[in-house]
Image (tube, rainbow, N blue to C red):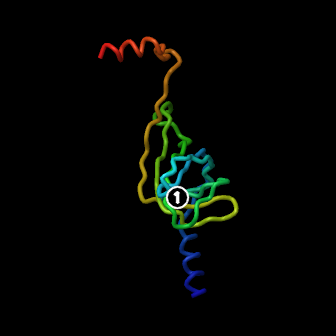
């Protein structure tokens, strides 16, 4: 059994991991609790991500995460890498999880020149509808 565990450890390390520093927010999927916890991505590859966080879910739990992607789309549009998967490893600094679902999303931004309509105007529009 120990030999099998050593082989699995070696196989996991065969995949290259790329260092990346990016803010992440994560939450458990199975608990019904919508609380999000902050963290930082330490490294990732095309199959998984390692997150440094004070909140470390147990191995086998499903998590959902939104990673602030460090590169802008077209040099100006912020992106998020949104993913979910199963926690595969937990240590003193954080946890790793394997992707089961992932996608890039653009982040909504409001320019200062756009501003927001005053609350009174918004309620008037709602009453007219």
Element under disc 1? loop
The image shows residue 121, relative to residue 62, as above or below, that is above
The location of residue 99, given as percent across then percent down, is 46, 59
The location of residue 50, given as percent across then percent down, is 59, 58
Q: Residue at x 58, y 81 (%)?
A: 5
Quadrant containing the N terminus in the rendered view? bottom right
The image shows residue 121, relative to residue 64, as above or below, that is above
Q: Residue at x 53, y 43 (%)?
A: 69
Q: Residue at x 60, y 45 (%)?
A: 22
Disc 1 marks which residue?
Answer: 45
* Numbered circles on residues, count: 1
Q: Residues within 10 Å of mark 1 (few under 14, many from 20)?
A: some
Q: Residue furthest right?
A: 92
Q: Residue furthest left?
A: 129
Describe residue 103's horizontal placement relative to residue 34 as left or right. left
Q: Nearer the viewer, residue 3 or 89?
A: 89
The location of residue 129, given as percent across then percent down, is 29, 17
Q: Nearer the viewer, residue 49 or 66?
A: 66
Q: Nearer the viewer, residue 85 or 122?
A: 122
Describe residue 2's horizontal placement relative to residue 99 as left or right. right
Q: Residue furthest front?
A: 127
């Amino acid at each position: 059994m120990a030999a099998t565990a050593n082989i699995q450890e070696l196989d996991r390390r065969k995949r290259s991991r790329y260092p990346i520093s990016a803010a992440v927010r994560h939450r458990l999927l199975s608990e019904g609790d919508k609380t999000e916890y902050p963290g930082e991505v330490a490294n990732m590859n095309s199959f998984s991500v390692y997150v440094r966080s004070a909140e470390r879910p147990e191995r086998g739990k499903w998590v959902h995460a939104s990673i602030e992607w460090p590169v802008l789309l077209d040099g100006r549009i912020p992106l998020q890498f949104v993913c979910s998967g199963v926690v595969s490893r937990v240590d003193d600094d954080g946890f790793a999880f394997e992707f089961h679902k992932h996608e890039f999303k653009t982040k909504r931004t409001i320019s200062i020149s756009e501003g927001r309509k005053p609350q009174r105007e918004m309620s008037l529009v709602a009453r007219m509808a």
